[in-house]
Each structure stands twice: as structure tokens, then as C-alpha cells.
Image (cartoon, rainbow, N blue to C red):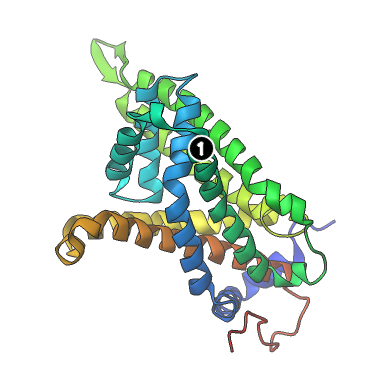
Amino acid sequence: MKLIDPRAQIIMKHPLAFAWTVLKGFRANQGLLLAGAVAYYALLSIVPLLILSVIVLSRVIDETLLMQTLSRYLEWLIPGQSASVVAELGNFLAHRDVVGWVLLVTMLFFSSLAFTVLENAMSVIFLHRVAIRRRHFLISALMPYCYILFLGLGLLLTTLVSGSLQAIGQESIDFLGHAWSLHGISGALLYCLGLAGEVFVLTSVYLVMPVGRLSLRHALVGAVTATVLWEITRHVLVWYFATLSQVSVVYGSLTTAIVVLLSLEIAATLLLFGGQVISEFERVGNRPESAPAPGLRTD
């Protein structure tokens, strides 16, 4: 019994060739174009989704703690702009009494758009799966709302754990006459919590969005790839916006929207790129190396 997947052995022997195949496949599938569509609808969906989550969760958990958790982990998605988004969210919540059922339904609809577009983008990336089987339209219709529900539960769990870790960070240990603060340990645990949450969310996306049943191991490969690339990119973006960027001079009052859209597009690109890694991994050894990468044609 082989402990290592034969496809993994092929990739380890020719890592650069596999990376080149992934890049060619991503380009053939118009990955940047798909990422732009996902980012646009994510921009429309993110605030309504956050509003719905906070309105529901604030009934069972302290709103201040909830907003602090959102602010901290929104930095992972939109570096440098989480404060602006949370401030707008706070303004809306201050007038939550005027929110009617029609507005709630509208927000729920827009919150589902990003998931629908992401599912379509994944169908292009995993075209070889769609050609074999297709998903029932009722599943596609209900999946975004189920995913929103699970994201809300995940936010609730993250808030509770984050609150506990923050409480630990305020404590100290007395040892040999010295007081050792646990703030550093708490910060490291909060970072690990965010990193684990990122891998978990990406893994769930790769398990749910593509047609058919995807191996958990393959989903983890794509999730870890996208997470590592995003962590590097996120720190670069934070440094760039803090030191070199002149976007506020060029766009003025539109700065927040432009920066958020740029961050979402980069994140969507890496998300789809992780999917492309999984797609190419599934086809390693199943087609000649010289075969052209099938992709989306726009002509």
C-alpha cells in the first residue's frame, strides 16, 4: 500500500512543470475575469451579510464583543479598511428599528449573489467535473442560504473563543517574583485562530462549490495554497497602503470602496487559483503533458 499519492509523487518530481500547468490552466479559464466578477458581487454582498449576521447574533452575544471580532478578522479580508466597514455597519445598526421585512429579504438576496457567482466560477475551473455530472438547480438555489447560516454559526463560535482569548491576554502569571503577561500568548492564539478559520473556510468552499464530491485531502491542498499566498499578499498590501499608496489622492471619497474592491479581487483571484491547483492535481497523469489546457473561450 503506497502512503504517498502517485500524483503527488509526479508533482514532487516536476514541481515547476506542475506550477506552469496550473498557471496555463488559470489563464485559459480567464481566471482574472472570473475573479473580477466574484469580487464585484462580494463587494455588493459583504455589508448586507455582515448586517444580517450582527442583527441576529447581537440577540445572543454582546454587540461590542461581536463588533471587535468582526473588526479584527475583517483585516484578514480587507487589509487596512476594516475600521471603515465596521463604522458603516455601526451606523446602520444604530437605526435597526427601521429595518423592515422587505429590506431584510433584499439584503438576504444580495448576500447570496456572491455565492452564486462563485459557484459559477468554480464550474469553469472544474469544467471536467461539470462535463460528467451537473448539480440539481434546487441545490444550487438553497446552497448560498445554507452557507450563510453556517458562516453565521462560525462567526458566533469565533466570537466566543476570541472573547475568551482576549480575557486570557489580560491575565498574568507570577513566577519567581516576576509577573509574566499572557498578552503575547493571547495574540499568538488569536492569530492561529484566524489562520485556522481561513483554512477551514477555504476548505469548505472547495468541498461545497465544485460539482461532485471532492476529496478532503485535495480540498486542503487548495486551501493551504490559497492561505499561504493570501497571507503573503495581505502583509504586502498592509505595507503598501501604509507607506507607498497614493490611492486617497487619486480617488478621494471613493478610496474605501476602491481599496476594498482591489483587496476582494486579489483574494478572489487566489481563491480561484487554489481551485485551479486542485483541478490540475485531479488530472495529473490522466492526460498527456503536451495536451493543451482546456479553458473558457471568449471568442
Which image quadrant is residue 6 in? bottom right
Give the image location of residue 285, x and y in percent: 76, 75
Which image quadrant is residue 127 in? bottom right
Give the image location of residue 199, x and y in percent: 54, 47
Vertical side of 134 occupied by 87: above or below: above
The quadrant in which the C terminus is found is bottom right
Instruction: Describe the element under mark 1 as helix, strand or loop.
Output: helix
The quadrant in which the N terminus is found is bottom right
Give the image location of residue 45, x and y in percent: 47, 50
Instruction: Give the residue at x 62% y 79%.
Output: 296
Mark 1 residue crowding within 10 angstroms, few (<14) / some (14–19) / many (20+) = some
* Amino acid type of the residue tagged 1 in the rendering: Leu
254, 214: nearer the viewer: 254
Give the image location of residue 251, x and y in percent: 20, 64
Instruction: Give the residue at x 52% y 34%.
Output: 101
Vertical side of 182 occupied by 247: above or below: below
> Residue pushed farthest left?
249
Instruction: Give the residue at x 58% y 60%.
Output: 117
Instruction: Give the residue at x 46% y 67%.
Output: 36
Residue labelled with disc 1: 104
> Residue pushed farthest right?
1
- Residue 225 visible to the viewer: yes
